[in-house]
Amino acid sequence: MFRIEAEVDKERHALLRSRLRDTNTAASPVLAALRGTPAEREVPLHVWAVDEAGNLAGGLVGHTWTTWLHVDLLWVDARHRGRGMGSRLLARAERTARHERRCRGARLETWDFQAPEFYRRHGYKVVCAIPDYPPGITEYTLIKPLG
């Protein structure tokens, strides 16, 4: 007998993640080969832009895992848009991922009203489009080889 519970539980979340990782590693020779290596861990990658007063003007938050950079968030304050700041933040993250962490690819998700064209100009290609996610909006997954 068991019961179903719906609650936020950080300890169970960590346990579930660990058990899923173990299950995946047992099922995949590729993931098994990564076990215990630095590439197995998700390593945060953050790049910040601050203005003259020290205020946040933009930033990129992501992580690297195996040989991939995953860009989670990229934002530039409206006052600083159109000046190349987003391009510089993205380039710095890609350079760090490629040269310091030996990543071969980058991936991210963006919505149709955000920045798919920005990423396409930077060499990203759409590999997935999910219409109506959320309703009335299309979400894109994009990837880019990092050399």
Image (cartoon, helix red, strand yellow):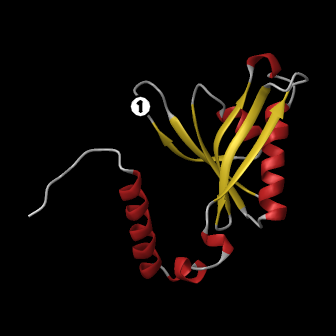
Picture layout, residue 22 above or below residue 76: below
Q: Position of residue 94 (x, y in %)?
A: 78, 52
Q: Is residue 12 visible?
A: yes
Within 10 Å of disc 1 (Cα), the crowding (few <14, some 14-19, many 20+) is few
Q: Residue furthest left?
A: 1
Image x and y of residue 65, in percent: 63, 63
Residue depicted at x 36% and y 50%: 9
Left or right position of 64 against 135: right
Task: Specify whether 98 is left or right of 19.
Answer: right
| Residue sitting at the far top | 79
The answer to whether residue 17 is above or below residue 44 is below
Residue 67, by quadrant, is bottom right
**Residue at horizontal 79%, vertical 26%?**
57
Does 114 sit above or below residue 45? above
Q: Residue at x 41, y 52 (%)?
A: 10
Q: Quadrant of residue 7?
A: top left
Where 64 sits versus 53, above or below? below
Image quarter where the C terminus lies is bottom right
Does 17 sit left or right of 90 as displayed?
left
Q: Is residue 147 visible?
A: no
Quadrant in the picture for residue 136 = top left
Residue in the picture at 40% in, 26% down: 135
- Looking at the image, which is closer to me, 84 or 96? 96
- 82 sits to left or right of 32: right
Is residue 111 or residue 43 the one in the foreground? 43
Image quarter in which the N terminus is found: bottom left
Mark 1 element type: loop
Q: Position of residue 110 (x, y in %)?
A: 59, 37
Residue to which mark 1 is pinned: 132
Location of residue 22 in the rendering, given as x and y in whole percent from the top left corner = 43, 75
Looking at the rendered structure, the kind of residue marked 1 is Asp
